[in-house]
Image (cartoon, rainbow, N blue to C red):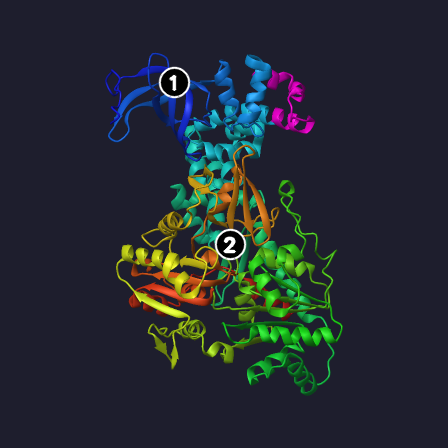
Amino acid sequence: MAHKEQRYPGDDKETKELAGQIERITYNDAESGYAVLRMSVKGYPDLVTAVGTIVSPAVGEVLNMRGFWTDHPKFGSQFKIVEYSSFAPSSIQGIEKYLGSGLIKGIGPSIAEKIVSLFGAEAFDILDTQPERLLDIEGIGEKKAAAIHEAWLEQREMREVMLFLQSYGIGTGYALRVFRHYGSASVRVLQENPYRLAVDIFGIGFTTADKIASSMGFSKESPLRIRAGVLHVMNELTRDGNVFVPIEKLTESASEILSVPAELAERGIEEARLSQELIIEWYTDIDGNDDCAVYLPPFHYAEVHSAKNLGSLMSAPFNGRYASPDIVIPWVQEELGISFAEQQTEALKTALKSQVMVITGGPGTGKTTLIQAIIKIRSARGFSIMLAAPTGRAAKRMAEATGHEAKTIHRMLEYTGNSAAGGDFMKDESNPLDCDLLVVDEASMIDQILFHHLLKAIPKGASVIFVGDVDQLPSVGPGNVLKDIIDSGMFPVVHLNEIFRQGEESMIVINAHKINSGEMPCLTDRCDGFPAKDFYFIEENDPDRALEIIIKLVTLRIPQKFGFDPVKDIQVLTPMHRGSVGTARLNSELREALNTCHGSKVQRMGRVLQEGDKVMQIRNNYEKDVYNGDIGTVLRIDGEDSRVIVEMDSGRISYDFSELDELIHAYAVSIHKSQGSEYPAVVIPIMTQHYMMLQRNLLYTGITRGKKLVVLVGTKKAVSIAVKNDKTRKRYTRFAARLKNCLNG
């Protein structure tokens, strides 16, 4: 029997007042605050649908609303809320629904029923003033009673603050983050300086803070606005990988973004310098011209001291004493059961006489074999050896390849992860690492700040070997450390470019080297006499059709032919976030095809997470020991405790609902996010619509993430564009020049 939608009287835009109790929350976007509510309203026989922006709605809550009726073409009559006031329910049934809605951490439906059963209409007063009486309820001890009372008081204060924030256009998702950061001082902080939001709150940028400030009456030429805008531009340019910014570029960018004259931008830069928020330094560029560099203080300090510390390590007397290479090299070959090629032999000779050196090369060139030999020789001499890499996956791979323990750099340096204090490294110059030799893999991923902390902790006299592929994408963070060390010309560098036997039959390895040399990869069934067993190209011009092919590849064709698990083993990597084969669309389609468990869900920051989802961490969280690029699976969503449990390589990680902006769906991720990781199989769409991102090092990095299988889906023209484009975005850094200065006295 068809349901006939009940229609209510009144003109669509005629303002009405309505009061009702929330019975069901059909939809609620925590980021925007938009909600679809089903409400019981006196005088209406059926539940009324009300829509609008609501701060943390809870079942059982009473709303006095002002708005108007609309007629949705699909959902029928809806009351659109323009203004509302919120009240706690007074009926026993309403109180129980309200408490059991999940709004108060620690109170679920069963606890709510017990509270109301014992205290009735006095439940709210008990929670306010007599929380010790909760001990009368079976299953509630002192610790849980205290936690419930604290959560009750916090949510009450939080809702008051969030209503204020929402009046200035801050969605509930971000408002919650503001409240967690500033607490009861939130309103005062915003009234004094709303631009602090852009600095203090992850996810709230300068643009949002500027809108809030404007609505509060701050002028366009306010000194607070100009200085905040300058610092915003500096932070954005460092996110692009720059350690410093030329003053002309900073002035021009700030003037444009703030829509103010250049003189005001210059004044903002000078005020930031006087307040020690910026450092200005004159230097001479490679053409002999004087220029002016602007730094954020941490980057200036890191660059200067990294150069001094690396220079000191290089200048120290060599700590290794060995027999002649003619004796040592044959011995280690016999121990490892291998025979070195000439290039490897020369590299090993360099390693045996260098205090600091770099080993760089592409896949299959013998970097790992060389590290194994160095470890074997140094171990035989009684050296204490440490191995490290920037990410957990890279460290795990290093340990498996060498048989020697390897740690992430942060774990090795004993990062405290104390977010209240900003975090710190326990290992430094006063408490150095206990090693004679440090080998650091995936060194191209290390940014300038992390490199500074690493160098501080290396003991005087220790040897250091940096291993990496300088032709991959540079670090996500500011700097170009490995390239700068090489470009300085002050350190022994071994470039491995010969593909050894184990890589000769791999089309992944062969094609990676072709791309790196500016040649088109082999896109046919056979290449250089070898069948394409691990590298395939599927030509498709239409992006929507390419999307369909990728879905079939991941869900059916690759698992059936190669036996790979579609979620754990196969990773889709893409150059772009938007478009038919960008991360957003791919994740949506792959998630629908692969996650059929229909488990519990949670919606935060505009994203829906469900049990069974494949997710990626997108920020370094040292407190949890998870890092940008780590991939895991959502095991459990606990609505009562507002927590999500994710299985990562490092173990089970617990996230509060307010921390879920650190996770994104990972059925498909950007190639940039895949740095330092390796997957059994990768599928890469490469279309001409990606032309803005098609670069040689991007394609090279994507292909080298595949360990056993790589499949490209797209056009030969797009591949050609990427191979020919070897122009990478310039990063402003003076690290190479500082190294030269330090080592040249």
Residue 297 inside the magenta-drawn segment? no
To which residue does mark 2 refer? 629
User: Judging from the image, what secondary structure is the residue with disc 2 in?
Assistant: loop
Residue 673: give x, y in percent of width and height: 47, 56
Q: Which amino acid does label 1 sit on?
A: Ser
Task: Pick whichever, 258 or 38, lies toward us.
Answer: 38
Distance between the alpha carbons at the discs numbered 2 and 1 = 46 Å
Q: What residue type is labelled 2?
A: Gly
Residue 138 inside the magenta-drawn segment? yes
Earlier residue among tags 2 and 1: 1
Task: Pick whichever, 283 or 670, lies toward us.
Answer: 670
Mark 2 vs 1: CB contact within 8 A = no
To which residue does mark 1 refer? 40
| Callout 2 crowding tier (Cα within 10 Å): few <14, some 14–19, many ≥20 | many
Who's the residue at 26% across and 58% down the image? 542
Q: In which quarter of the image is residue 142?
A: top right
User: Judging from the image, what secondary structure is the residue with disc 1 in?
Assistant: strand
| Callout 1 crowding tier (Cα within 10 Å): few <14, some 14–19, many ≥20 | many
Q: Can residue 401 be seen in this view?
A: yes
Residue lying farthest to the right in this orientation: 382
**Image position of 325 (left or right of 171):** right
Residue 665: give x, y in percent of width and height: 44, 48
Residue 601: give x, y in percent of width and height: 46, 38
**Image position of 46 (left or right of 602):** left
What segment is highlighted magenta in the picture? 124-150
